[in-house]
Image: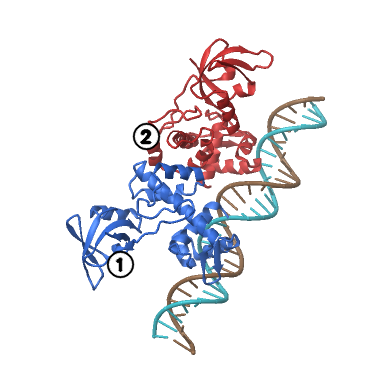
Chain colours: A blue, B red, C cyan, D brown
Amino acid sequence: MQSETIENYLKTIYHISGGNASIVNNKQLADKLGVIPATVTEAVKKLHELKLVIYEKSYGTRLTAAGSKMALSIVRRHRIWETYLEKELGFGWDEVHEIAEELEHIKNDKLIKKLSEKLGHPNFDPHGDPIPDEKGKIQKSNFIKLSEARPKKNYKIMGVTDHSSAFLKYLEKHQLIIGASLSIKTIEQFDHSIVLFCKNKEVSISPKATECIIVQEA
Amino acid sequence: MQSETIENYLKTIYHISGGNASIVNNKQLADKLGVIPATVTEAVKKLHELKLVIYEKSYGTRLTAAGSKMALSIVRRHRIWETYLEKELGFGWDEVHEIAEELEHIKNDKLIKKLSEKLGHPNFDPHGDPIPDEKGKIQKSNFIKLSEARPKKNYKIMGVTDHSSAFLKYLEKHQLIIGASLSIKTIEQFDHSIVLFCKNKEVSISPKATECIIVQEA
DNA sequence: TTATTAATTTTGGCTTACCAAAAAATTAAT
DNA sequence: ATTAATTTTTTGGTAAGCCAAAATTAATAA
């Protein structure tokens, strides 16, 4: 099995399982990877042989310790590159994901070490996602989704879970950028949309969007 | 045909033909690419279909204008990365080639543009090789091999044609680094080894090494 | 010029990573 | 609990990129 294919599978399993080594199914993987489920069946069998996942027939797949370690290292490379592209090379936060998808497959520990060093060993990337350290450890935080925020409280935007250019541009338009402070005014009971103050403006955010914005109580 | 395979073939044809679009044969390609000649036969047929090379059966292969353009762009990416790794990230000149072999396949014009910009649009990489510009144009120079230098004249080291770590370390030991000035004392007639002064030291350089050192009359 | 050597091409085969369609198993809905 | 819908697996097939061995062609030397 090709190293890049392995990496893409492990990374995707990691993301779907939310970093918990919980079970993911073939359909989810197939959708994210842009292949049909039959292809996934083949692949997870091979990854099982390689002891990178535990695949149980007709049930699902989860990462082993070894697989998890590898996934974390890919995620680290991806996020270091995203940060580097933004901070050192002046790319926009909506451009970095795509380029990092390619750069993440270059395996050279010294390279990532140098990039991290130059950046002052950041713990979060431009989208607010945590960057695992060399050992795969993630700095955990009290981040919650905006959809879980409580009325009357104050929050700070820490990240997003949708990296599409369209969404990021939408956020910028409303000045909902990383680091911005906001306070929740009301939460509509009937559709769960949230009305908040940010930069002295009142904005109503749809439930779909509040699911994708990560905040921290401030 | 996969883009990375194509790129490796075009790049190799370019290098063997010395940038002249002259004919290269299967054996040479097979050796450089680490495959057997039969594999090369298959590949060059396909590249011919793609109009990237002209392949004449049992005779040889040369780049078309389109193939040459692509090769130049790969060479540019490679050399920009080598320069960036050395200048911006502090890698040694003997380390950069290997990493650039991987990085060169990332196709993102904006990325290369940014790197080049940050470096002040260099025309030569850490090994003294010219970096083609966005249009594929190479700054030509009056560089010659040290083996072609004349006695009593003064030269400046501009590059090397062997990028192996062993050779580069050997050069560093004798302080024969890029930019160093030297003068030719004598050229041994019987074996063509060259005795030169560099940094006030007299060194004798074997013909094998003088073939790999590029100098410019100073 | 013929014999020898070297390079090239052909042929048959392998593995990886995919797909399509059919069959089997699981899950959900009535 | 049975049907319907969904997911998973199996089975055959494909294209890329490689190799080994045999056959051909070209180049070199005697």
Q: Secondary structure at mark 2?
A: helix
Residue B14 picture location, percent across and down = 53, 33
Label 1 and label 2: CA atoms lie apart by 44 Å
Residue A34 in sight: no
Output the chain of dot 2. Answer: B
Return the residue nearer the eye: B143 or B30: B143
Number of residues whose C-alpha sits closer than 10 Å to that of mark 2, classed few (under 14), some (14–19) or many (20 or more): few
Return the residue nearer the eye: B2 or A106: A106
Number of residues whose C-alpha sits closer than 10 Å to that of mark 1, classed few (under 14), some (14–19) or many (20 or more): few
Horizontally, residue A173 falls left or right of residue B184, namely: left
Number of callouts in the render? 2
Identify the residue under disc 1.
Answer: A148
Image depth: mark 1 or mark 2 in front: 1
* Above or below for B2 versus B199: below
Q: Secondary structure at mark 1?
A: helix
Horizontally, residue B120 falls left or right of residue B11, namely: left
Identify the residue under disc 2.
Answer: B117
* Above or below for B109 versus A72: above
Residue A203 picture location, percent across and down = 20, 60
